[in-house]
Amino acid sequence: MKRIIGLSGLVFCFALLAYRSQSATQSNTTSDASRLIGTWRLVSAENVRDDGTFEPFAEYGAHPIGYLMYDPTGHMCVSLANPNHPRWANPEKPTDAEKLESYRVMFAYCGTYEVQEKEHRVVHRPEMASWPHYVGTDQFRPYRLEGNRLILSDRETAPGHAPSAYRITWERVEK
């Protein structure tokens, strides 16, 4: 016995095929912007030497701590710190030297961000920062995503200084 699929059945089949095709395409082309959203834990913060080896940022030590957060509203916040700096002798009245050391071993800023996927960079726009000269600037961070890791790295030339390269590696925080 032959069955004839009616027009509505045929339309349903085409709609189902189109939906499955679109879903597969969307899952394979997730944008970097959406992949960045979430919380990232600091793995390492390093200078890249001329010979290609790495050296931890002195101020944060060999095992730094920190978080980088991107939210869907376009806001971000980042903090990096050395977990091993001395506690203040008197938490109610830290000395100027103790306050200066705390400032030296911790860095943070928050503001908005924009992902420029073609350039593989994210632009941080600090609205508040432990370094006041960051406020109101565009901080360009070239990035690459490798599995559950986000790597920010670049080569910079500061006025009056030799060129230097850095690499900051973050790992996604899972629930």
Image: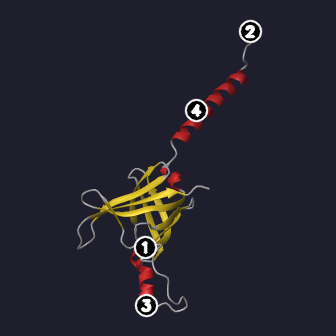
Marks 4/3 in contact by CB < 8 Å: the verdict is no
Circle 2 Cα neighbour tier, 10 Å, few/some/many (<14 / 14–19 / ≥20): few
Give the residue type that dot 1 points to.
Gly
The CA distance from mark 3 to mark 2 is 91 Å
Residue where numbered disc 4 is placed: 21
Residue where numbered disc 1 is placed: 136
Q: Position of residue 56 (x, y in %)?
A: 36, 66
Residue where numbered disc 3 is placed: 96
Q: Earlier in the sequence, mark 4 or mark 3?
A: 4
Q: Earlier in the sequence, mark 3 or mark 2?
A: 2
The CA distance from mark 2 to mark 1 is 72 Å
Give the residue type that dot 4 points to.
Ser
Q: Is residue 2 above or below residue 69?
A: above
Q: Residue at horizontal 74%, vertical 12%? A: 3
Q: Is residue 117 above or below residue 77?
A: above
Circle 1 Cα neighbour tier, 10 Å, few/some/many (<14 / 14–19 / ≥20): some
Q: How many marks?
A: 4
Residue where numbered disc 2 is placed: 2
**Which image quadrant: the C terminus?**
bottom right
SS type, badge 2 = loop
Circle 3 Cα neighbour tier, 10 Å, few/some/many (<14 / 14–19 / ≥20): few
Give the residue type that dot 2 points to.
Lys
